[in-house]
Amino acid sequence: MVKLIIATIKPFKLEEVREALTEAGVRGMMVTEIKGFGSQSGHTEIYRGAEYAVNFVPKVKIEIVVADGMADQIVETITKTAQTGKIGDGKIFVLDVQQAVRVRTGETNEDAI
């Protein structure tokens, strides 16, 4: 069985998290720039003297597929590395993957990652 780990983190933490995950044995990941909101519900900024609401906050979404036995370690690595202790540090979700296939070779599941 393989797991999909989806993590949303602050953008400035991406390189540090990537390095920590590489050291932990992650061989690949997908990264997307996203916008979202959670507890902080956005904030206000001033532009040319006028205050306006910023409803979505920039985040980075990392998607990693790992063997079942690695999932807890990877979640812990992301948590420790991405944490600043301030609101908006992000979230991590772990999902079961029904099937994984490497397109080039046709390898499946753990062999595909």
Image (tube, rainbow, N blue to C red):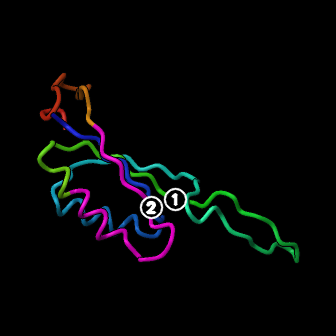
Residue identified by numbered label 2? 90
Q: What amino acid is found at the position of numbered circle 1 in the picture?
A: Lys
Residue at figure coordinates x 36%, y 66% from the top left = 15
Residue identified by numbered label 1? 59
| Residue 17 as seen in the image, left or right of residue 71 | right
Give, as a single range, the part of the protein colored magenta.
74-95
Vertically, is 53 above or below 69? Answer: below
Check disc 1 and report its element: helix, strand or loop: strand
Along the line of sight, which residue is nearer the eye, 58 or 76?
Answer: 76
Nearest-to-viewer mark from 2 and 1: 2
Q: What amino acid is found at the position of numbered circle 2 in the picture?
A: Gly
Check disc 2 and report its element: helix, strand or loop: loop
Tell me how many marks there are. 2
Image quadrant occupied by the C terminus: top left
Q: Residue furthest front?
A: 39
* Residue 61 x %, y %: 44, 52
Q: Circles 2 and 1: CB distance less than 8 Å? A: yes
Residue at figure coordinates x 22%, y 59% from the top left = 22
